[in-house]
Amino acid sequence: MKKGSIQTSVGIIGGSGLYEMEGLSDVREFFPTTPFGRPSGPLILGKLEGTQVAFLARHGQGHRIAPSDINYRANIFALKQLGVEWILSVSAVGSMREDVAPGHVVVPDQFFDHTRHRISTFFGGSVAPGVVAHAGFANPVCPNLAELLVSACQQQDLIVHTGGTYLCIEGPQFSSKGESLIFRRWGVDVIGMTNVTEAKLAREAEICYSTIAMVTDYDCWHETHDSVTVEAILETLHRNVESAKRIIRSAVASLPIERGCVCESALKMALVTPVHAIPLATRRRLTPLLSRYLAPETPLRPRRVKGATKRPTRRLALVPKTPGRK
Ligand SMILES: [Zn+2]
């Protein structure tokens, strides 16, 4: 499959339990490469409700990749390379609130990053040295996409909580009871291990991102936590996955929508390094992210001047030492 021939504006990232998307037609598998390595698995391309989508299983097919080992940068970059403008994320979460019960859906509007071992930026580091960007993250979720997901939940007669804070912990262990009780006091609503990293990278990639957080169980602060059987949790997980598929089908049918949101131009004011000062190799690697900010006069290859030979060596002028100074 030719890289340039594939374009899709909708990406779906499936979490625990959601490893494939049924109902896709014209299905093709695509194994992309990115400057950040390979994504969690192949991108499954196909049509869903008449819309071209790209599906990616976050933990890989067969759930083989732990939250800290997911190549988040490759996942988001691979979707960006395809031209994705919307990412619908599905994830299993624990509830931190009594009234947010297992089986409910939360569409968070905030994140709290409690991870410790992740790179959550495309800029800088060994792959893209010489460029600094500080993207705004005050409103980390796309309001337009979140609204679309909420109405898709309502159309499916699911109990949906609009807004809330998703606390992202490093994992892979669940929280201790002490932590869980403290997190409750922080005022968070749901707890998970993956979404904040994706949301940060999606923002840098100027992709609209919103999460369908499916509540599997109460976190361990709840008095019923210890008495809930694994079977009961798995049953809820299975039911949630079926609900998530219905939500996605319903939401995707309404895409594309007008963007005009904060996500669309997130890098406009975020790039601190002037484009001409970004090393050529970095500019080349980050072309999908930076192309709209690269002015025509900033070529991706060094200009060759006809007839030019070696650059003349600059000679340092010999300055006489000022008396009294060292
Ligand atoms: Zn947006």
Image (cartoon, helix red, strand yellow):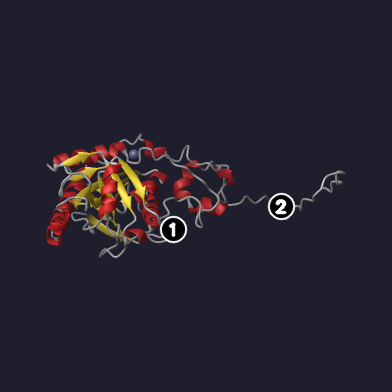
- Which amino acid, by three-letter code, is at mark 1? Phe
Q: Percent x, y for residue 57?
A: 28, 58
Near-viewer residue (222 or 234):
222
Q: Are marks 1 and 2 in contact (CB under 8 Å)?
A: no
Of all residues, the one furthest to the top in this rendering is 260
Can residue 1 be seen here? The reply is no
At x 84%, y 48%, the residue is: 318
At x 24%, y 57%, the residue is: 16
Name the residue that disc number 2 marks.
308
At x 16%, y 57%, the residue is: 226
Which image quarter holds the N terminus?
Answer: bottom left
Near-viewer residue (257 or 101):
101
At x 45%, y 47%, the residue is: 289
Q: Quadrant of residue 157?
A: top left
Can residue 127 be seen here? The reply is yes
Distance between the Cα atoms at labels 1 and 2? 36 Å
Q: Secondary structure at mark 1?
A: loop
How many numbered marks, from 0 up? Answer: 2
Name the residue that disc number 1 marks.
36
User: For mark 1, does the 10 Å Cα neighbourhood hold few (<14), some (14 to 19), or many (20 or more) residues?
Assistant: some
Q: Which mark is residue 142?
A: none
In-image side of 34 versus 275 (left or right): left
Q: Percent x, y for residue 129?
A: 53, 53
User: For mark 2, does the 10 Å Cα neighbourhood hold few (<14), some (14 to 19), or many (20 or more) residues?
Assistant: few
- Which amino acid, by three-letter code, is at mark 2? Ala
